[in-house]
Amino acid sequence: MPTYIVLMKATEKSMANPKDLPKRVQQAREAIEKFGGKMLDWNLTMGQYDAVAKVEFPDDYTVATFTLAAAKTGNQKTTTMRAFNETELKQIVEKIP
């Protein structure tokens, strides 16, 4: 399955109850699974983004649908990037003329 990196910025709504964050991470994990995906990793971060997740989804359409559905909660703003592992990198560079 394709891998994606999701960069998250918390909203004022989510910071109103920071102790609920572990519960919301678990809810996100379950929602991702309902979309046929899997959360591989989730990290609280310091700096420009408040959290980073590594997820798998069947395809770009599914991850786009999930992120739009998740945006409805109003808890975070996200930037999602397709990530290629080392095996995929080798396949990519082999195609370079």
Image (cartoon, rainbow, N blue to C red):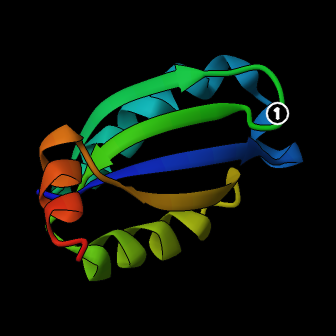
Which part of the image, by quadrant, shows the C terminus? Answer: bottom left
Res. 36 in view: no
SS at mark 1 in the image: helix
Q: How many numbered discs?
A: 1
Rendered image quadrant of residue 59: bottom left
- Look at 68% across and 21% down and name the residue there: 45
Taking 96 as reference, is 54 above or below it? above
Find residue 42 and report its horizontal and vertical position in percent.
Answer: 44, 27
Residue marked by disc 1: 15
Taking 72 as reference, is 8 above or below it? above
Find residue 26 and report its horizontal and vertical position in percent.
Answer: 37, 31
Res. 4 in view: yes
Q: Nearer the viewer, residue 9 or 27?
A: 9
Find residue 46 and report its horizontal and vertical position in percent.
Answer: 77, 20
Taking 60 as reference, is 80 above or below it? above
Rendered image quadrant of residue 37: bottom left
Left or right: 53 in relation to 88: right
The outermost residue toward the bottom is 61
Which part of the image, by quadrant, shows the N terminus? Answer: bottom left
Taking 68 as reference, is 26 above or below it? above
- Mark 1 is on which residue type? Met
